[in-house]
Structure formats: C-alpha cells, structure tokens
Amino acid sequence: MRALEKKLIRNLWQIRGQVLAIALVIAAAVAMIVLSSGTYRSLELTRNLYYEQYRFADVFASLKRAPDSTLAEIGQISGVVNASTSIREYALLDMPGVIEPVRGLFISLPEGVNPLNQLVLRSGHWPEADSTEQVLVHEAFAQAHDLHPGDLIHATIYGKQHHFKVAGIALSPEFVYALGPGDLIPDNKRFGIFWMNRDALASAGNLKGAFNEVALKLSPAANPDEVVAGLDRILRRYGGTGAFTREDQRSDSFISSELKELKSMTRIMPPIFLGTAVFLLNIAIGRLVETERGQLGLLKAIGYSDNAIGFHYLQTALVIACVGILIGWPSGLWMGHGMAELYIAYFKFPVLRYHITPGVFLGAATISLAAAGLGALAAIRKAVRLPPAVAMAPPPPPLYQTGLGEKIGLFRGITPSGRMVVRHLVRWPFRSGLTVLGVTLSIALLLSTLNFFDSIDVMLESFFHRNNRQDLTISFTEIRPDSAAADIRHLDGVLKVELQRNVSARLVAGHLSKRTAIQGLDPDAELSQPLDIDGRKIFLPAQGVVLNEWLARYLNIRQGDLMRIEILEGRMPEFRVPVTGVSKEYVGLSAYTSRTTLNRYLRDGPVANTAIVTVDASKLESIYRKIREMPFVAGVTALDVSEALFRRLIQQNLFTIVTFYVLFASVLAFGVVYNNARLTLIERSREFSLLRVLGFHQREVAWILGGEVALLTLLALPLGCILGYGLVRLIVTFFASDLYRIPFAIEPSTYGYAVLVILIAAIFSGLLALYRLGELDLLSVLKERE
C-alpha cells in the first residue's frame, strides 16, 4: 500500500463522524433515486409488457346498440389493424354482508382470433362454450368477497333476477385500476367486473346479433385523432357516446398519473440532498487541506506531483460518496419493495415485481460520485496551487477586530461565552450560511411531505361536503322522465331528490379540445353545485356553461369567452355558448350547464339519467332494498362509504410514504448540523482545552459548542418554513393532473410538526458532538504544534 493510500485511510478514520454524516446525506439521495426511478421503471415496464402481451386496445367507444355487421365497416377505417366488439351491461348484485346495492359490470368474453383486451385466468377454468350461468370474476372483487370457483352470485339485469356460478378468477388489462362509475378510488367491495359467454349476456341485455362496445388496435403510423373521428361518424347513428384514445381510458389514466408523480419525485427531491452533500464535502475536504498544510508542503518537497496530491483528496471525497452509495442502494431497494407492495394493493397486474435494472444503480452512483467530485473541487484546487514553501510555513493567524454589531452595542448584555459563539459564526459566514441552508432544506422537505395530509383533508372536504352534499347517487340504466324523481321520493326515508342529466361531450376552444362530461343541473340544485374560489355557489344561467379551474386553464379560456360544445350522445348536436363562471374543484374535469338547456339541445323533454338524494340514515337499509327492485336503476353510490374508503387508503399508503420522507429529512438535518458541530470542535479544540485549563467548567465550554448548533438551527427555522411554503407550491404544480389536483393547504400544526422533527434531529447531532467534546485530552491538544 502506497503512502498516500495509508494517509487516506488514516484521514477517513480521524474524521469518521463527518464521513458517516456526509455519507448518510448521499445515501438518502441514492435511496430516493433508486426508490423513485426503480419504482417508475418497474411500474412502466410491467404496464407495457402487460398491455402488449394481452393486446390492450388503443381506441375505445361505447354506444347504445349496433348490428354485428357494423364491425366490417369499422375495420375499413384507415390505421385500424384490429377491431373487437363486446357487450356490456350493468347489474345490481346482492352480496352477503353488504347492505348497499353492489354494482357489477358484465362483459362478454373476448372472441375471435387474437381478440383485444384478453383476459388472464388466475384460477378456476373458462366458462363452458354453451353455458349461460358460468362467469369469470375480477380478482379484486373475488378477494374482497372471498369468492372461489363454484360460488354463486345473484344479479339483477334490467329488472330480471339471474343466478351465476363462478367458473374462475381473472384479470384484464382494461381494469388494472378497477373503478366503478363516479368512483374516485376502487371500491372492490361494492363494484365488480364479470365476464360471461356473449350469447348468454346478449339474451340478458336484449342484444342478440348486436354490440354496445368496440375496441380498436392501431398501426404505429395511424393518426389516433383521425381514427376517433372516423369511428364517431360510423357510430353516430347507433347512439355512440364518443370514441376516445387510451390516454382517456380510466384505468390507464390513473396509472399514467402515478407514473408522472414518480417522475416528478425524482426531479425534485434527490437534487436537494446532492446539493447539500456538495457543500458538506466542500467544507470537510477544505478543512482537511487546511489542517494538513505542513504535510502537503513536505510531500511536494520530496517529489509528489500536484496531480497525485489532487487525486488523493479527490479519492477522499469519492470514498465518502461510495460509503453513501453502499448504504443508499439497499435502503432504496428495501423502500422500493415497500412501494411495490402499496401498488399491488390497488393496481391489479398479473405480476408486479420490483425489478431494478443495473442502469438505475449505476445512474444513482454516477450522479453521487459527480456531486462528490464537485464538492471537493475547490479544496483540490487549493491543495494543488499551494507552493511547498508557503505550505510548510504556519498559516497566518486570523485577523480579529471589533465588528459593526459590537460597535453599535448590538451585543451589549451578552455573556462572553455568547460573544464567542457569535464571533465564530461571523468568522466563517459561508460555512454558517450553508449550515443554515441545509437545515432550511430539511424543514422545507418535511413540510412538503407532511402537507399531503392537510391537502387531502381540504380536497375531501371540498368534494364530499361542499360540492357534493348528497347521501346517495343513483344512476339510471337509460334516460328517464322527471317522474322518476317521484318514484324515488316516495321511498320511505328519502328526504330530498335532485335530478341531473350527465352527457359525454367534447369542449373546443380554438385549437384546444378536451373530452369530458357535462352535468346538467337544475337552477335550484343544492346537493351538487359548482362553487367559486370563495366557496360561494355559482348560479347557472339559462345559456352558458361553468368550467372548473383546471379545465378552463387547459382550454386557455376565461369567463366571458365563447366555446363550442360537441355532445357525443344522442343526436350529437354542436353549439356555442359563453363561459359564465369558473369553479374551484380538485377532482376531475367538470363542466356544468342548465339541465333544461341541455335537454333542449338534445331535443329531449324533461329527462334525467342520475338522481342524487339525501336520506334518513336510520332507514337506509330499507331504501337499499327497495332500490334493488327498481328495474331502471343501474347503480348506487354512497358518498360516506366512498369518503371512508378514500381516507382508509390514505392512512394505509400515505403514512408509509411520509415515514420515508420524514426519515430522509431527519438524515439531512443530522448530517448538516453534526458536520458543522464536528468541524467546530476540530477547529476550536485548542481553544476549548485552554478554557478548561483556565478554570471554565465543562458545561460552560459545552454551552459554547451547543450554542452554535442551537443558534444556527433557530436561524434556519423561519427560513425553512418560508422555503417549505414555496416548495409545496412547486410540488402542487408538478403533481396536478386531469384526475385530481392537490390543493395548497398548510395548517399551523404542520409547521409545528416539521419544526419539532428537525429540532429532535439537531439535538441528537448536537449531543453527539458534545460527547466528543468530553473525550478531549487537554494536555495532548495543548502540546500540538500550531
């Protein structure tokens, strides 16, 4: 082993505390890269392979009814390489242990050669070819109800009772994220998907020789917009509700949104840790060079080149980075497996393995090593440029003089120990500033994570208690006259009923367009209503449309502008209306207009396809029982059940993610504070020893060192809260999507929790430094050569 290599090992051992602190900061950055990038790539790869292997479609369309012969015409659309049709019918299920009517979506089994949206049989067997009673059950629903092959299911389709037998359990690429109509998150207890033979389902839904759903596979060169337009033209006469591409398919939209968030996480968080590691290494290696001036001069004098000495200090930084990498790799892998377990709970893939390619590990290591090299660069330059004669001479003593603060009496009344604390911090303003910055970043990172709890509370309060105040949402199998409200209102326990007409539409503003649903509301609607930014109800005029803020921003349209609406149902009318208001909502892309006006454009009378009601909770079970008997009811959603499910999912999943980030922020605060305290102890060991010899008690000396830690931490607290405020704003922007937006909301208690965690981390690192202070050998320190 060469002399410089021995010196490297000795140096690292002497500053082992700093080495560990800096390595932990680098490890946190590496772990976050492995966690987010690895999870992103695993999820993306799993999704893409699943879609490819089981032929997930590119374009989808629903319609009322079209003859099977239409498939040939659809296949002639330019760019279509495969077309599959199916039958879909909603049903109400009577499941043991669930008082609410459980909704079921029955789909005909894929047929033909290489059909689209093929199924994965998980257990059991395929329904027999001539069976009218055997079904496959989606795995999520089967697990929620403990269903197994051979079990019976009772369903009501179009008012008629049917009894089905479970043949097997299956998955589909179309329902990786199995959402029921109107649901925010999967409710596997109250919504299930079933597949059965086409002839049997056609008989139940009166669709013999016809279909009501079509899926297309496109060639790589196809123009999706042109295919969608061509499909809409064909299906217009069959009650088509507007074709859409994969990006608007509900299941894939949620997966894509999750991938976007993972990518944003990779872009925002790791740079904070790596930037902190750069300045920690800059200080640590710089201090090492300063204390080894004499050794540097001697090494150069006996023939060591500048390159050899520069590489020696670069090695020091790289070894520290390697320690962090070796800690970060397994930590990120372990956390990634934890994230994968969360995804398995609600993303239903046949297999979801947390598989990380070597490129993720190498990428994290390369970035970390580059950051380490950057951190050591200034110290290396100083060591290389230092002439031997100058290096072997003692450094000039620091120049002490009365500062401005003392001249104006700012420190009057401060004890001598307090003045020693302030003077030392002022003597090293750059280092003190970087330490404050590091703790500031820790608080900001913690605030940006804990804020999720506040934001989710605001989002749920807005959606479940302000915008929507009904107890139940009842969807109809088809449009019904307003007399349907009387049928529901007469049920014992129903307090209030409001009708809605919800239709699919394409909103067009200039060259921008978006496919969404328009809610037709009555002017006196109170249970479901658009609210402005101040929470006030927005009244719907006879002519005009109200858009939520996100949709208006996407279309680049403001209140008072004209826009075109293309209805994608019925006669598919088109009309131009002004935007009369912009609502503040955090879920979905909502557009509201008058139900009367909407029905007039569709050339329909007073009809609706949804009813929202409030009920007497004590009679809820009786109401559910009566609703099951109504042939025109397609499904029922209880808002309190949806909210409880949402909150439970958040408690289970968000808590795990927040725990990871609290750990990361604590590591960052510990690394920064301990590094600064340790450097102070090394620099002032002679001074502290001299104070002890002069008669100062160890507690008084400890107060000087602890005072620096406390003062720097206290300076960082308000700055961290301010920076955290800005970081939350940035994250809210990054994580916004068509599906939901995270509202900006930070409660005062969140600031308190963040500050408390950082104070605990700072106290712990300060106590470690004070322990080192107690180990000082006073005589040995005082005998050391200046």
Image (cartoon, rainbow, N blue to C red):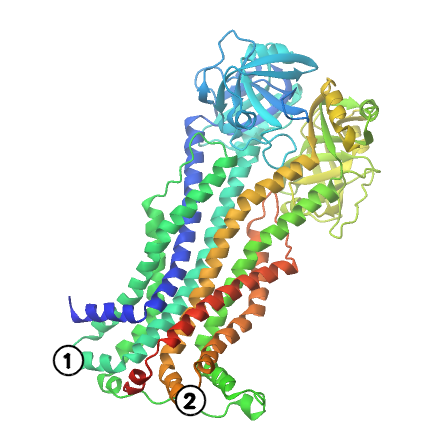
Residue occupying image coordinates x 62% and y 42%:
647
**Quick one: label 2, few (<14), some, or many (20+) residues within 10 Å?**
few
Task: Give the quadrant of the N terminus.
Answer: bottom left
Residue occupying image coordinates x 44% and y 68%:
765
Answer whether residue 79 is visible to the viewer in this image. Answer: no
- Please report contact status of discs 2 and 1: CB closer than 8 Å, yes or no: no
Task: Give the quadrant of the C terminus.
Answer: bottom left
Q: Amino acid at mark 2?
A: Gly
- Left/right placement of residue 48 relative to residue 63 reads left
Give the image location of residue 649, x and y in percent.
57, 40
- Left/right placement of residue 775 relative to residue 466 reads left
Residue occupying image coordinates x 44% and y 59%:
271
Marks 2 and 1, the one that precedes in the sequence: 1
Question: Which residue is the site of mark 1?
Answer: 302
The image shows residue 361, relative to residue 589, as above or below, that is: below
Give the image location of residue 232, x and y in percent.
61, 26
Q: Splitting the image into 4 quarters, where does residue 746 fall? A: bottom right
Q: Secondary structure at mark 1?
A: loop
Question: Which residue is the site of mark 2?
Answer: 695
**Quick one: label 1, few (<14), some, or many (20+) residues within 10 Å?**
few
Compute the Cα span from label 2 to label 1: 44 Å
Give the image location of residue 89, x and y in percent.
62, 19
Q: Amino acid at mark 1?
A: Ile
- Left/right placement of residue 316 relative to residue 759 reads left
The image shows residue 737, relative to residue 366, as above or below, that is: above
Name the residue nearer the viewer: 607 or 784.
784
Question: Residue 45 got which mark?
Answer: none
